[in-house]
Image: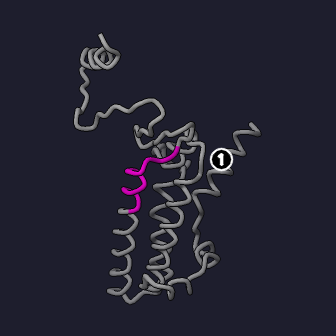
Amino acid sequence: MSLVNYINNVLCECGLGVNQSKVFKTSPGEKWSFLGFSYENGTIDISEISKQKLKKKMRRKARALVRWRKRKNLPYERAAVAFIRHFNKKLYANDATDQITWCRWYFPVINTSEGLGEIDEYMQQCLRYIATEKQNGAKYRFKYSDMKKLGYVTLVNSYYKYKNSKKVS
């Protein structure tokens, strides 16, 4: 009996099943993804699918907030703060709740900040879109320092603070 069959049998005995459309086999050394993580040559990062899902949520939220801001004739800061607040809840640990957030799920496992940097960059693009409604060079009138004043926190910075706090403990 192969290891794959053995695992499937054990899962079946526990009343669980495997979605065969999501199963794929790789050769040793090939990149693979599992539960939102990707692994390649000793590097554990956020999977492409997880990054794309979060980016789509950010894009939809940014567009909705721009529409809301126009409809209510509000300053861009209100919409940007709402965007930051929404994603801070999703990304960062909150002592008031026991929700699984990105930092609780990914930070203990990943060993690179590459995927986090990609998400940070996209979030900054969304914030610039909310502020300027532009997708070109004019969007850079909304500076990184302005984002930080509104409460923006980078995932990369938070990740390294987390890693450094674990080294001290």
The answer to if 48 sits in the magenta stretch is yes
Give left or right: position of 58 versus 120.
left
Q: x, y percentage for residue 19? A: 24, 33
Q: Is residue 11 above or below residue 73?
A: above
Q: x, y percentage for residue 158? A: 63, 54
Q: x, y percentage for residue 112? A: 59, 47
Mark 1 crowdedness (10 Å alpha carbons): few <14, some 14-19, many ≥20? some
What amino acid does circle 1 point to? Answer: Tyr
Foreground of the two, 138 or 77: 138
Foreground of the two, 115 or 40: 40
Q: How many marks?
A: 1
Task: Work out which quarter of the rendered image holds the C terminus and state it.
Answer: top right
Q: Which residue is pictured at 41% across the width and 51% down the height? A: 48
Q: Main secondary structure of the magenta part?
A: helix
Looking at the rendering, the stretch of residues picked out in magenta corresponds to 45-55
Q: Which residue is pictured at 38% across the width and 33% down the height? A: 26
User: At numbered mark 1, what does the secondary structure look like: helix, strand or loop?
Assistant: helix
Q: Quadrant of residue 54?
A: bottom left
Q: Is residue 51 above or below residue 37?
A: below
The answer to if 41 sits in the magenta stretch is no
Q: x, y percentage for residue 16? A: 26, 24
Q: Quadrant of residue 31?
A: top left
Farthest residue to the top: give it: 1
Q: Which residue is pictured at 32% across the width and 20% down the height? A: 4
Q: Is residue 141 above or below residue 154?
A: below
Q: Is residue 60 above or below residue 157?
A: below
Give left or right: position of 126 versus 150.
left
Q: Which residue is mark 1?
A: 162
Task: Work out which quarter of the rendered image holds the N terminus and state it.
Answer: top left
Q: How is the protein colored in the picture?
A: one colour
